[in-house]
Amino acid sequence: MRRTSWAKFSLLLTGAILLLPLQGFAATQISVLPFTISQPGSYVVSQNLTSSGDGISVQASNVAIDLNGFTLSGSGSGNGVVVTSGSNIQISNGTITGFTSGVEVSEWNNNVRVASVNAIGNSLWGIHLFGTNNQVKGCTVTGSSYIGIRVGSGSRVEDNNLFNNGHGIIATDGNTTIAGNTVTSSLYNGITNGVACLVKNNTVTYSASYGIATNAGSLYDGNVTYGNLVNITGCSNCSFGLNAQN
């Protein structure tokens, strides 16, 4: 085990970022897969790891997983990191590849943050967060045949790069912020959002269907769309700022 002086979560709570300092805790090393987390605390991956099923399974709240720049590799099945119970969870700083889903969070698990994760070549989903008030920030997602990033209501999807996925970003449960993302070459839609969302400062290009599929009560501002079959769909009950379309 290795001691760290501190670690902290940046987590969502009722639409805000909650900072949870974890000072003086030992970071438990993850050196083999599969690995189950059943206690709160900080966990750090110590080397590149492979798994034939699920990689890391989280069954506790108040957990920080630092991939530490390493790669979790699957054999085409299971989930790289799966959260089956718990909330206030952070997954950060590494690569997850070769699973069915890179990160999978069940629908009753909230306040999960995925940051600086490369979800590469996971067969169906890159980052799939069913719960509410979650965040995906600064991630790269490519090669997922169904959805690159999916989140539930009250979530934030910010500053991510997505390319060559089925759908790029889906946030159909509404009340979500989708901002600063680059979404390229989606097989279907680039961004699909639910009601009452903020969709701002995204660049969406070369989607085979809709660049941005709009929904009622949402605000669209500062987006750049070009090369999509339809850049931005019409919406009679939406608000539009300045969006560039070519």
Image (cartoon, grey):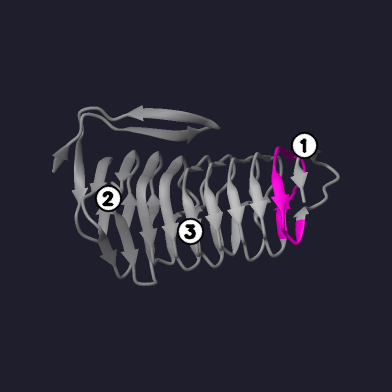
Q: Which amino acid does label 1 sit on?
A: Leu
Q: In this view, does 107 lie above or below 11?
A: below
Distance from Cα at disc 2 to Cα at disc 1: 46 Å
Q: Earlier in the sequence, mark 2 or mark 1?
A: 2
Instruction: Tell me the residue that label 1 is attached to.
Output: 242
Q: Distance between the residues labelled 3 and 1?
A: 30 Å
User: In the image, is residue 128 part of the stretch drawn in magenta?
Assistant: no
Q: Measured along the vertical axis of the image, is residue 229 above or below residue 30?
A: below
Q: What stretch is highlighted in magenta?
A: 210-230
Residue type at numbered disc 3: Gly
Q: Which residue carries the number 3 mark?
A: 126
Dots 2, 1 in contact, CB < 8 A? no
Of residues 58 and 140, the one nearer the viewer is: 140
**Residue 136 x %, y %:** 49, 44
> How many other residues sit within 10 Å of disc 1, few (<14), some (14-19) or many (≥20)?
few
Label 1 residue SS: loop
Q: Determine which residue is flagged by label 2.
A: 37
Q: Which amino acid does label 2 sit on?
A: Ile
Vertical placement of residue 70 versus 16, above or below: below
